[in-house]
Amino acid sequence: MGNLDKYFKGQQTHEELICFFRQHWIVMIREFVFFVFFAAIWTLAVINMNNIISFVNNTPGMETILVVGYVIATIYVHYFFLKFLNYFIRVGIITDIRLIDHKKTIYFIDTLETTELNNIQNMEQVSEGFLPNILGYGDLKIYLAASSTVKTFFRVPNPQFHFRCISRQKEERQRMMREREPAGLNYAQNLVDDKSKVKYFN
């Protein structure tokens, strides 16, 4: 069986997992600020529940408003925890042969976008601004050799480490591919080179 589907679905038999990464926690900061604000309002409502019940009973139509508010609060709590879980299950994966963007959510999305390390022509690590440099996150741009496509991983934590990791695996993969070239192919290439030299000097 080897490593078939050992650490993630789609892992090949002889494929080795090097590391994986998620987006930086800064992408969730806005959601946490809103949730803290919501939790503070909810706490105040629970503390003053007797006063709220008395007000609702003495005010016509407030029952409907209270029910609508409760439904909205329930939907928001579910939304927040879905965002929180989706943050953890969407990952980038670096193996010894490819780079994988695993886009996954709880209910609707589960896709793997792969980039072979041999197809990477160039990479760029971008950390611009005060917060990216202080908190240690940035974007990784992957330029492909066969097309003008640019694959970007946004807000990657410790981008220098992952940049070096991808670079080293790319170099190692290219070295292995060169060593696996058939001896006949190398001989044919050398023969063509020798004939060219003879023709040139004659």
Image: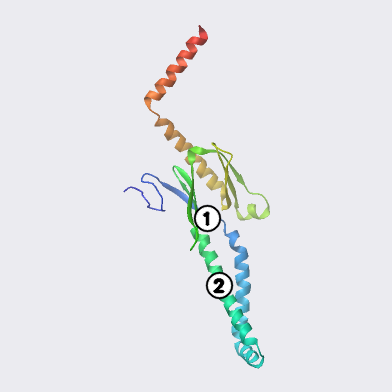
Residue highlighted by disc 1: 22
Residue highlighted by disc 2: 77
Report the amino acid beneath label 1: Arg
Question: Where residue 135 sits: x, y (%)?
Answer: 61, 56
Q: Nearer the viewer, residue 136 or 128?
A: 128
Residue displayed at 45% across by 17% down? 192
Q: Residues within 10 Å of mark 2 (few under 14, many from 20)?
A: few
Question: Where residue 64 sits: x, y (%)?
Answer: 62, 84
Report the amino acid beneath label 2: Val
Position of residue 190 in the picture relative to residue 38 (left or right): left
Position of residue 21 in the picture relative to residue 29 (left or right): left
**In terms of image quadrants, where is residue 163?**
top right
In this figure, which colouring scheme has been used for the structure?
rainbow
Question: Where residue 17 sits: x, y (%)?
Answer: 42, 48
Q: CA gap, disc 2 to disc 1? A: 23 Å
Question: Where residue 202 sits: x, y (%)?
Answer: 50, 6
